[in-house]
Image: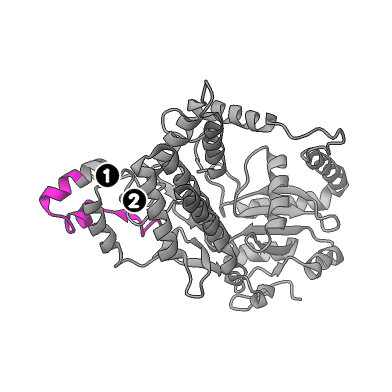
């Protein structure tokens, strides 16, 4: 193996089956896939491992790749100081889960992608971690090249601290595992009640959702609230607050920019507390779970909005994510035509060309196109729109270049089957 892959050459990722790994095959970084060969090389060279975990539709993964991994000077520093391993988290969720958990413990903060870990070559235990790093210091974060140099120096000068730190990390991670119940006691509702109380404390009574931005849909939490209400519905004191928390959140998400008002389907998360501007990638597993939750909410409440969103999300999954082979693609990229969210953003002039005067005025008032732009000088639709006007804009979007689909696989359809099965069961 060479220590450096010159620009235009192919590194060890060229023969991988993962589309994400193959995207990095021409990087000047001497990337290796996770496996015995790369791990043995790190031990032999006595170099720490730089582990980078991402996936093909991750916007910030692409940004960091362009800024750092495609830069010859940064790549030369990476190759000099580290054995560099690239992991596709959709291919190896087991590795991703281990190091995401370690990152959260080490930093007392959430993880994400790209995940950047620095590991001891003998134990593979991390001693420093982060997510996205810019090439130079900005956003309150250190520059990536500065991080590389400092981590490399730490490994050379403070090797004795690594074992102690690694042992402490393993001990903390071990404490996260629930103890084995040796008493023979049966299951109780206590964990569910604790989860219900936690959601109550974190609930945003104005805009729905839980906690601060960025806000994620968390469909399992919403389903828990719906089931909690349903279990108490026949009692003297039904848990109407649980129903309210679930339905307010579902309503705000469906009316906000998290939901694609023209094409159906939900984006990954909202960068603000209002569900207005999302991170624009659309994930199969998010929408598969939300499909079931909205269907349950429609049955529970009879709310037409929930029924419509269920149908539109199912239509979007079948139209845009189903592959010709019968499986489903895992994601739609956040980027199209080289820009994040370009496929989803509009200008008043574009809308005016599609609608007559009588239609245009209520449309722009409903969507806020008569106010300041909300996304990079353009408008991302974030409230509900009359179907007659929406259909014209949706048809016009057909002239735009679609975001890329990623990773088709027949096995992905199980979530959709589960969700659609629940709908059928409730209607029968």
Q: Earlier in the sequence, mark 1 or mark 2?
A: 2
In the image, taking residue 58 as reference, residue 147 lies left or right, namely: right
Q: Nearer the viewer, mark 1 or mark 2?
A: 2
The residue depicted at 68 percent of the width and 40 percent of the height is 107
In the image: residue 366, left or right of residue 217? left
On the image, numbered disc 1 is attached to which residue? Answer: 367
Q: Which residues are magenta?
A: 338-362
Residue at numbered disc 2: 261
Note whether residue 272 is visible: no
The answer to whether residue 315 is left or right of residue 58 is left
Q: Between marks 1 and 2, how big is the CA–CA gap?
A: 10 Å
Residue 253 visible in the displayed image? yes
Q: Are marks 1 and 2 in contact (CB under 8 Å)?
A: yes
Front residue of this view, candidates 256 and 277:
256
Location of residue 320 with respect to 299 vertically, above or below: below
* 10 Å crowding of disc 1: few (<14), some (14-19), many (20+): some
């Amino acid at each position: 193996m060479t220590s450096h892959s010159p620009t235009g050459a192919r590194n060890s990722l060229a023969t991988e089956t993962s589309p994400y790994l193959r995207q990095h095959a021409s990087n000047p970084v001497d990337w290796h896939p996770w496996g015995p060969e790369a791990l043995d090389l790190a031990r032999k060279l006595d170099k720490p491992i730089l582990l980078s975990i991402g996936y093909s539709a991750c916007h910030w993964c692409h940004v960091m790749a362009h800024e750092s991994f495609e830069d010859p000077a940064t790549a030369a520093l990476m190759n000099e100081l580290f054995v560099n391993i690239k992991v596709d988290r959709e291919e190896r969720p087991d590795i991703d889960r281990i190091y995401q958990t370690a990152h959260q413990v080490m930093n007392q903060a959430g993880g994400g992608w790209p995940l950047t870990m620095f590991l001891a070559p003998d134990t593979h235990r991390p001693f420093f971690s982060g997510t996205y790093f810019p090439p130079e210091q900005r956003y309150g974060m250190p520059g990536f090249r500065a991080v590389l140099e400092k981590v490399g120096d730490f490994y050379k000068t403070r090797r004795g601290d690594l074992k102690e730190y690694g042992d402490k990390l393993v001990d903390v991670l071990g404490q996260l595992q629930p103890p084995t119940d040796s008493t023979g006691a049966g299951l109780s509702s206590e964990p569910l009640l604790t989860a219900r109380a936690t959601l109550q404390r974190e609930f945003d009574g104005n805009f729905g959702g839980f906690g601060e931005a960025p806000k994620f849909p968390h469909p399992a939490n919403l389903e828990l609230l719906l089931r909690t209400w349903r279990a108490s519905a026949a009692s003297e004191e039904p848990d109407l607050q649980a129903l309210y928390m679930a339905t307010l959140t579902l309503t705000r998400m469906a009316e906000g920019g998290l939901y694609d008002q023209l094409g159906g389907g939900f984006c990954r998360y909202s960068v603000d507390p209002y569900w207005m501007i999302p991170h624009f990638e659309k994930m199969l597993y998010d929408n598969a779970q939300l499909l079931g939750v909205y269907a349950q909410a429609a049955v529970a409440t009879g709310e037409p909005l929930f029924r419509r969103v269920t149908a539109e999300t199912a239509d979007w999954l079948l139209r845009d994510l189903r592959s010709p082979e019968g499986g489903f693609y895992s994601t739609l990229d956040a980027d199209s035509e080289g820009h994040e969210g370009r496929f989803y953003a509009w200008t008043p002039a574009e809308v005016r060309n599609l609608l007559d005067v009588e239609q245009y005025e209520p449309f722009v008032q409903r969507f806020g196109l008569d106010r300041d732009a909300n996304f990079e000088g353009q408008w991302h639709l974030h409230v509900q729109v009359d179907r007659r006007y929406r259909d014209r804009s949706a048809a016009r979007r057909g002239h735009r270049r679609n975001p890329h689909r990623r990773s088709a696989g027949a096995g992905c359809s199980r979530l959709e089957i589960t969700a659609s099965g629940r709908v059928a069961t409730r209607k029968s």
